Amino acid sequence: MKSVSILGATGSIGTSTLDLVERDREAFRVVALTAQRDVAGLADAARRTGAELAVIGDPALYGALKDALSGSATEVAAGEDAVVEAASRGADWTMAAIVGTAGLLSTMAALRGGRTVALANKESLVSAGALMTDAAKRHGATLLPVDSEHNAVFQCFDHGAPGSIRKVTLTASGGPFRDWTLDAMRSVTPAQAVKHPNWSMGAKISVDSATLMNKGLELIEAFHLFPLEADQFDAIVHPQSVIHALVDYVDGSVLAHLGSPDMRTPIAHCLAWPHRMATPCQRLDLAAVGRLDFRAPDLERFPAFALAKDILAEGAGRAVILNAANEVAVGAFLDGRIGFLDIALIVRKALDRYDPGSPSCLEEVFAIDVEARAVARDAMETIGA
Ligand code: NAD
Ligand code: MG
């Protein structure tokens, strides 16, 4: 039996993970579940799975969670430190599915436990990639990529002979505005931006997919996960989301990973790794799909992707700014304070105005993150938000 913890258990990735875990009660025992504010969702999941521990991030909701779990054997805790403690509880397998750099400390805590960490929380890797992969090495932890493209690369990559690989290509659906003009994108609403054509996801990553910042973050994520040079990673728009990534070898062979767009497939790959488990995901029917299309990303209409691509060779401090400014700008867009095209504009302004060195420890990452958020908020004021 594998013991599992899920950080961010009430989100899109968290609930997909629970769905798989709950299908096989003999195979998995739930140690800890965490959420930020969804008391009802967390308590319900804890009761269903008999979790040892349930943690709510917002300390004001401790009483509500305690009430919701009264009479159950689940231990209850609240607050940021308690989330990190939950991550250190020694589960065999931890899903890191908190959104944003808010997940960095808990993901690090799970890695320091030296077991298996399935990583969905890409923002932590973008901000602290080298520190995280170092921690995994030092503590003997296994870091498995959940992000569908990276999970696809992981499955096609010859880990014993990275020198035989010429190039890694991530695919991007292109998001809901793939064919829109810049002018039309000016008036995009949050409701339009969170409606992804192929994948069902949390609000923040849905907006990132619509700006293509998600693909930019994913290039940086890939750079930290796979031992290749920055210029060996690229992305291509593929509207059907059937191929998730391609690995191009020196002999001309190109290995691609295909599957229906359902996150339960890469999650199951991580959950069962190094074995395989069955999932209820829809089987890929290529005859029904009919055709696969590809085109290069349009850097003019999707400047966020271009910003992230440039950062790849510019050093770790720049990636922290890119990510932090993007988190601030996406939050402001979802709150209706800035327009859709302002997101990339704010990120660019933050990058122009602030240029710290590379962080050498987590404290420095957080210091740059805090400063970058302040610079991004300042930049928002200059555009009248
Ligand atoms: P989501 O918004 O649906 O869920 C986020 C989870 O994190 C929730 O459980 C929430 O309670 C928790 N959370 C939010 N803020 C928190 C905070 N400050 N402290 C502690 N917990 C907090 O997001 P999601 O779509 O499940 O995405 C989660 C992560 O996985 C993101 O980093 C995203 O980029 C990545 N990811 C998601 C998908 C997808 O299909 N949804 C695919 C690839 C990667
Ligand atoms: Mg992805």
Image: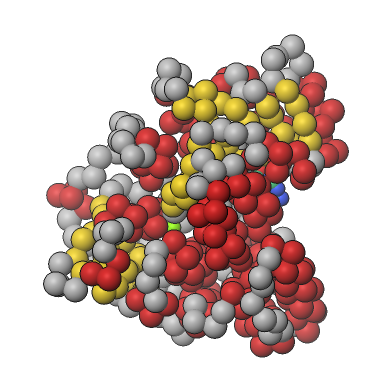
* Residue lying at 59% horizontally and 74% vertically, measured from the top left: 316
Q: Position of 326 compared to 20: left or right?
A: right
Front position in the image: 351 or 291: 351
- Residue 78 picture location, percent across and down: 79, 36
* Residue lying at 44% horizontally and 61% vertically, measured from the top left: 225
> In which image quadrant can residue 293 be found?
bottom left
Taking 256 as reference, is 220 above or below it?
Answer: below
* Residue lying at 18% horizontally and 50% vertically, measured from the top left: 286
- Residue 325 picture location, percent across and down: 67, 72
Of all residues, the one furthest to the bottom in this rendering is 352
- Residue 266 picture location, percent across and down: 38, 45
Residue 218 is at least partly visible in this image: no
Quadrant of the displayed image that contains ligand 2? bottom left
Quadrant where the image shows the C terminus: bottom right
Q: Position of 230 compared to 69: left or right?
A: left
- Residue 290 picture location, percent across and down: 17, 55
* Residue lying at 51% horizontally and 33% vertically, measured from the top left: 92
Front position in the image: 293 or 56: 56
Taking 108 as reference, is 165 above or below it?
Answer: below
Residue 64 is at least partly visible in this image: yes
Q: Give the total number of marks visible in the rendering.
A: 0
Quadrant where the image shows the N terminus: top left
Taking 169 as reference, is 2 above or below it?
Answer: above
> In which image quadrant can residue 368 be found?
bottom right
